[in-house]
Image (cartoon, rainbow, N blue to C red):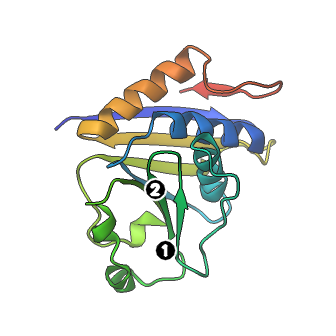
Amino acid sequence: MTTQALRLRTFSEEATLGLGRALGAVLVPGVTVLFSGELGTGKTTLVRGIGGALGVTRVRSPSFTLVNEYRAEHFSIIHADLYRLEPGGVDDLGLEEYLEAPCVLLVEWAERWTNPPERDVLKVFIKAAGEKNQSERGFEISSFGGEADLALQNLREAVKNGKTHSGVGLQFALD
C-alpha cells in the first residue's frame, strides 16, 4: 500500500470551509477521515464544510456528546470528537462498528484513538500557518489505501483545476 499526500494552505475560515466542501464532494462510504492538530486550528470548520457538501445543513461539534450522526442523501456521516477522552476511553465508543457500516467516519482528535483503521483512511493534519494572517492554515492530507487513495486523487485534481469552491476571496495554495 502506497501512501499519497497533498499539502495545501487556506487563507480564511471561508476557504477552510471551501476545502471541506471539496473534500466532502470526493468522499464515499467506507472512508474514515482522521483529523489532528492543535486546538482552534479548524478541525470542526473543515467537518462543517464536508457536511455541507453532503447535504447536512447543521453540523454540531460533538465535544460533549462525543459522536453525532447525520444523514446525507445516500449514506450516514458519523462525526466523533475525542478531545475529552483519554486514549483508552476511545475503545468504549465502539467506533470500530462504524467501519463496517455504509458511512463516512470523521474523527477529530484522532491521535487519541489507540487503534485506528489502517486502510481506506485519510489523515488530515492541520496547523495554524500564518504569523500575520491568523486565519491561515496549513493542511497535510495523506491517504492510506483503496477508496481513500481515490478520494485524495480526486481532491488533488479539484484543487489543481480550481473546481473546489465558488465565491469571491477563496484561495488555496498547493505546497
Q: Position of residue 115 (x, y in %)?
A: 26, 69
Q: Is residue 53 left or right of residue 78?
A: right
Which part of the image, by quadrant, shows the N terminus? Answer: top left
Front position among marks 2 and 1? 2
Q: Is residue 80 left or right of residue 171?
A: left
Question: Which residue is farthest top?
Answer: 161
Q: Considering only vertical position in the picture, is 165 above or below 90? A: above
Q: Which residue is mark 2?
A: 76
**Label 2 SS:** strand
Q: Considering only vertical position in the picture, is 31 above or below 2? A: below
Q: Is residue 169 left or right of residue 25?
A: right
Q: Considering only vertical position in the picture, is 14 above or below 111? A: above
Give the spatial CA distance, label 2 vs label 1.
19 Å
> Label 1 neighbourhood size at 10 Å, few (<14), some (14-19), many (20+)?
many
Residues 83 and 80: in front is 80
Q: Is residue 35 visible?
A: yes
Q: Position of residue 144 (x, y in %)?
A: 27, 43
**Label 1 SS:** loop
Residue type, label 2: Ser
Residue in the image at 60% along x and 56% along y:
43
Q: Which residue is mark 1?
A: 82
Q: Position of residue 69 (x, y in %)?
A: 51, 66
Residue in the image at 31% along x and 81% along y:
91
> Label 2 neighbourhood size at 10 Å, few (<14), some (14-19), many (20+)?
some
Q: Position of residue 4 (x, y in %)?
A: 32, 33
Q: Earlier in the sequence, mark 2 or mark 1?
A: 2
Quadrant of the rendered image containing residue 74: top left
